[in-house]
């Protein structure tokens, strides 16, 4: 019996083991996830293809589907409605968020937007202001182009008038002259146009101070709240995919050409796009996918200032995805051993660069943004930092090159510096700006500085970048930022280029009231910490520690110094006696100050009245301009304006060999209407005819009163046959139009199309003859 009982137990145990092994061997079903692309397949989404093909999504337990864009649908709504889990969109997401939409930014892949405006070089349209009154083919459903809108608002184009056209077949319509400018991607359409032999001009919002994020990987608030771990896994896989795609451009070009090429792009076009995306992603100066809270807040404020969005009532705390990993540094054994062996670290700083690094004049202690970060890192890592206070900035760089210090706190990565330093991911970003005297207008491009003396601080990133990229700008090198600003104030140089936060701080605190920030360069001070190349463990430790700092901590440090809030706790006890001794003088000055305040109040009132008068004058000028081009009775254009438009359209049609037709209308027997029914009835007939024609023509057509009962219709991009058809529709509509007096009104029309070599007089003479034939043939007909 003992033997009989043994075998069943042994076999049952074996069965259990086999079942467990089978269960372990079963693959875990991957989570199905849909990513909604913002456009058709192209290199713009290479990182997502790489993450899919290299198995990065699969390694994270994700079964990902990439869905192409359909222009019939709003790709952002597709994510927020749950039709897709994740999506790609540009900074228009900020507008959606300000409207209360529940979305979360996961990772901006493009640090700079590729959205630009494109015009034909032959058009002469080179600046945003040239677009006033012109036709722009723009995105139909407002899911792209927020940087373009901000630029047009900043330049006053939206205020002064812009004709917005639909987006379909935009490049073909640009070539045909139907539109004057189109929204485009700097990496796409310009290359295609140049390949076809059409020179173009690019109007880039970045050149006008509108530097927004480009493609942003985002999700819904519901996904971020309910599945934060999945969001982290998606972000990791996407970032890995983009690193692989940018490191292996040729391989990805072949992959897209073979498997994703729904647009039929050539390999050359795909590679041009790949090379164009690299500087927009800027991964060598900014961590791929890095999102700067301060920059985000600035963008929202900029959009609110131009009334593109309402002032943000939500803040950005819900907008940015925060990792759930918290402050766990996850140091390796080698990194922990490094910290134990190096409890005190030597730090190189630039003591003349407030608000990042400077010495307190009263205490002699190091203060600024960098010191605040060092205080946090000291607590996180359990080490002390010993700053080298007696070295100039060039001496700091020399010490780092000779391995004589452990780290530098605030430094921008440049090609030269990367030869001897290892950089952390940037933790502070500030634009490199152009400072001039108050008398200088806005500097829109670096070309405006060619041939003019421009100051930079010796061995700063601005020195290296301008020296290598802009050799036509003569540089004057100073020892400190303050010296550079003082050189501009004294008129010794035309401009000074440095960090926005630094120059703003010094201009305010040093009383340099005659200076202003006049422009922004294409470059940024993406400030990192750096270590000599023989300390790779330290660079990794600093990266992990900086990554653990929360967005709130970053914002508090930045606001503390850039906002320049006064420090509390002024020592009144020590200052009591001097204050009492100055009291009498203050009382005297108080009376004088009151006098000045009243004087300033009167000046402000005068300025307000002056401004009101100026606004009234502008409105009267606008009304006067309107009166100068319109017929008082009918409200349509007058003869003077028609002459001007017809001359312009004839020149344009002749130059580009495009069709142009004109129609001359004459109300039949109009004198009898006046004689029989009176001039008031005749006026109503003229007004009704004008309204009728305006309701039957296109927005691109120009209609006006030629004189008396004659009216002229100018039809660009219209053949003779098409113009005759339009004129006949108007004739028939007038024939059926009832009038209060019971009268019936007919119209005759002559139509003429522009022929090669025909001038303005010949065109007008021809259409007049056609009208004469129509009237001589019995009236109420169209002759063309």
Image (cartoon, rainbow, N blue to C red):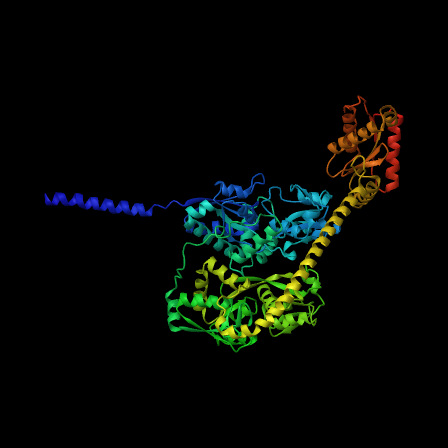
Residue 136's x, y, as percent?
68, 45
379 relative to 215, above or below = below
Position of 483 relative to 742 (above/below): below
Q: Is residue 753 visible?
A: yes
- The image quadrant where one finds the N terminus is top left
Q: Residue at x 69, y 54 (%)?
A: 608
In the rendered image, which quarter is residue 604 located in?
A: bottom right
**Residue for point 73% across, 38% down:** 699
Residue lying at the far bottom of the rendered structure: 390
Q: Is residue 247 visible?
A: no
Which residue shows up at 57% across the image and 57% down it? 278
Q: Position of residue 483 (x, y in %)?
A: 63, 73
Q: Is the C terminus in the top left, top right, bottom left or bottom right quadrant?
A: top right
Q: Is residue 377 above or below residue 128?
A: below
Does 182 sit left or right of 226 as displayed? right
Front residue of 6 and 442? 442
Residue 655 drawn at (x, y percent): 80, 46
Would you identify the image quadrant in which residue 601 lies? bottom right
């Amino acid at each position: 019996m003992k033997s009989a009982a043994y075998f069943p137990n042994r076999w049952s145990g074996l069965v259990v083991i086999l079942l467990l092994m089978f269960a372990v061997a079963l693959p875990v079903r991957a989570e199905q996830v849909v990513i909604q692309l913002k456009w058709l397949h192209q290199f713009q989404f290479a990182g997502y293809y790489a993450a899919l093909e290299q198995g990065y999504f699969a390694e994270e337990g994700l079964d990902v589907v990439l869905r192409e864009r359909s222009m019939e649908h709003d790709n952002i709504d597709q994510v927020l409605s749950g039709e897709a889990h994740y999506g790609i969109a540009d900074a228009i997401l900020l507008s959606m968020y300000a409207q209360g939409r529940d979305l979360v930014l996961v990772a901006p892949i493009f640090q700079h937007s590729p959205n630009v405006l494109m015009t034909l070089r032959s058009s002469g349209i080179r600046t945003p202001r040239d677009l006033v009154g012109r036709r722009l083919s723009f995105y139909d459903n407002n899911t792209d182009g927020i940087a373009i809108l901000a630029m047009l608002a900043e330049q006053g184009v939206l205020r002064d008038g812009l004709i917005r056209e639909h987006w379909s077949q935009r490049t073909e319509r640009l070539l045909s002259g139907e539109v004057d400018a189109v929204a485009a991607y700097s990496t796409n359409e310009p290359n295609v146009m140049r390949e076809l032999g059409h020179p173009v001009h690019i109007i880039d919002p970045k050149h006008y101070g509108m530097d927004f994020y480009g493609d942003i990987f985002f999700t819904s608030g519901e996904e971020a709240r309910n599945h934060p771990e999945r969001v982290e896994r998606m972000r990791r896989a996407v970032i890995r995919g983009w690193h692989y795609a940018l490191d292996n451009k040729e391989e990805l070009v072949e992959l897209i050409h073979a498997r994703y090429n729904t647009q039929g792009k050539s390999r050359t076009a795909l590679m041009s796009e790949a090379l164009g995306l690299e500087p927009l992603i800027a991964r060598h100066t900014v961590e791929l996918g890095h999102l700067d809270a301060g920059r985000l807040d600035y963008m929202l404020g900029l959009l609110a200032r131009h009334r593109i969005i309402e002032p943000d009532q939500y803040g950005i705390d819900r907008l940015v995805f925060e990792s759930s990993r918290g402050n766990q540094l996850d140091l390796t054994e080698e990194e922990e051993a490094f910290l134990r062996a190096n409890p005190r670290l030597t730090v190189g700083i630039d003591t003349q660069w407030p608000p990042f690094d400077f010495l307190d004049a009263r205490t002699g202690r190091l203060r600024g943004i960098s010191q605040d970060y060092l205080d946090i890192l000291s607590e996180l890592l359990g080490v002390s930092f010993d700053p080298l206070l007696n070295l100039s900035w060039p001496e700091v760089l020399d010490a780092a090159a000779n391995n004589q210090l452990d780290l530098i706190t605030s430094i921008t990565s440049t090609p030269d510096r990367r030869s001897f330093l290892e950089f952390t991911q940037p933790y502070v970003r500030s634009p490199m700006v152009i400072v001039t005297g108050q008398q200088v207008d806005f500097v829109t491009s670096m070309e405006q500085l060619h041939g003019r003396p421009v100051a930079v601080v010796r061995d700063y990133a601005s020195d290296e970048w301008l020296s290598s990229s802009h050799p036509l700008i003569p540089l004057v090198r100073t020892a400190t930022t303050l010296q550079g600003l003082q050189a501009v104030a004294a008129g010794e140089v035309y401009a000074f280029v440095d960090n926005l936060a630094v120059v703003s701080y010094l201009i305010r605190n040093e009383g340099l009231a005659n200076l202003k920030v006049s422009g922004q360069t294409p470059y940024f001070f993406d400030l990192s910490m750096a270590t000599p190349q023989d300390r790779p463990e330290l660079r990794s430790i600093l990266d992990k520690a900086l990554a653990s700092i929360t967005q709130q901590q970053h914002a508090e440090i930045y606001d503390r110094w850039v906002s320049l809030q006064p420090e509390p706790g002024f020592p009144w006890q020590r200052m009591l006696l001097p204050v009492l001794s100055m009291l009498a003088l203050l009382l005297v000055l108080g009376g004088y100050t009151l006098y000045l305040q009243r004087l300033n109040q009167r000046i402000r009132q005068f300025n307000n009245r002056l401004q009101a008068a100026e606004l009234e004058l502008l409105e009267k000028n606008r009304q006067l301009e309107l009166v100068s081009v319109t017929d008082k009775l009918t409200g349509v254009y007058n003869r003077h304006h028609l002459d001007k438009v017809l001359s312009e359209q004839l020149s344009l049609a002749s130059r580009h060999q495009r069709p142009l037709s004109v129609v001359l209308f004459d109300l039949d027997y109009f004198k009898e209407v006046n004689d029989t029914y009176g001039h008031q009835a005749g006026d109503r007939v003229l007004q009704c005819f004008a309204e009728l024609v305006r309701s039957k023509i296109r927005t691109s057509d120009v209609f006006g009163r030629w004189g008396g009962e004659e009216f002229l219709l100018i039809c660009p991009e219209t053949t003779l046959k098409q113009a005759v058809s339009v004129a006949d529709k108007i004739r028939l509509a007038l024939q059926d139009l009832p009038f209060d007096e019971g009268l019936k009104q007919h119209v005759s029309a002559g139509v003429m199309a522009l022929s090669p070599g025909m001038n303005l007089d010949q065109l007008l003479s021809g259409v007049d003859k056609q009208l004469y034939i129509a009237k001589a043939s019995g009236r109420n007909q169209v002759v063309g």
